[in-house]
Amino acid sequence: MFGYLAQEKGFRPINWIMFALASTFSIALIPIVDETRGSVLLSRKAAKLRKETGDDRYVAKEEYERGSVTQMMKTSLARPLRMLTRVSLHQFLSTLLALTLCYRAF
């Protein structure tokens, strides 16, 4: 099906079809897939216990360590840059990808 479409219309319609399918499945999976991150599960469990018992001693570790939005943004932006500057494999692959994209652009 996609081979015929690629020959007749080119690759762009295939990309749009794949985008639509991926978006549909991603939206459909949101209510089906449960949370698996441990810190989120513990925070939810602590909140539930606080609500049920009325005891404020139930606190997850992440609730103590949660920083401000500014601090989280700094961490989220600094980690990839630190990895890019310190890990030689990432430097090599990033350079290779940049050269490949530049070659295809011209």
Image (tube, rainbow, N blue to C red):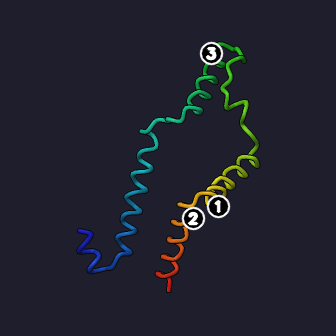
How many residues crowd mark 2 within 10 Å: few (<14), some (14–19), many (20+)? some
Tell me the residue at 40%/68% (across/down): 16
Give the Cα separation between the discs numbered 2 and 3. Answer: 51 Å
Judged from the image, the secondary structure of the residue bearing numbered disc 2 is: helix
Question: At which x and y percent is residue 17?
Answer: 36, 65
Which residue is tagged 1? Answer: 85
Q: Which of 35 and 16 is in front in this view?
A: 35
Give the mark nearer the N terminus: 2 vs 3.
Answer: 3
Q: Residues within 10 Å of mark 1 (few under 14, many from 20)?
A: few
Name which of mark 1 and mark 3 comes first in the sequence: 3
- In percent of the image, x 41 and y 47: which residue is there? 28
**In the figure, residue 62 lies in which quadrant?**
top right
Q: Is residue 26 above or below residue 101?
A: above
Which disc number belongs to residue 44? none
- Percent x, y for residue 70? 76, 49
- The one of 77 and 88 positioned closer to us in this rendering: 88
> Which residue shows up at 71% across the image and 51% down it?
73
Residue 13 position within the rendered picture, expressed as x and y whole percent measured from the top left? 36, 73
Which label number is shown at residue 52? 3
**Whether label 1 touches label 3, CB < 8 Å:** no
The quarter of the picture where residue 19 lies is bottom left
Secondary structure at badge 1 equals: helix
How much space separates mark 1 and mark 2, taking CA atoms?
7 Å
Residue for badge 2: 91
Q: Which amino acid does label 2 sit on?
A: Gln
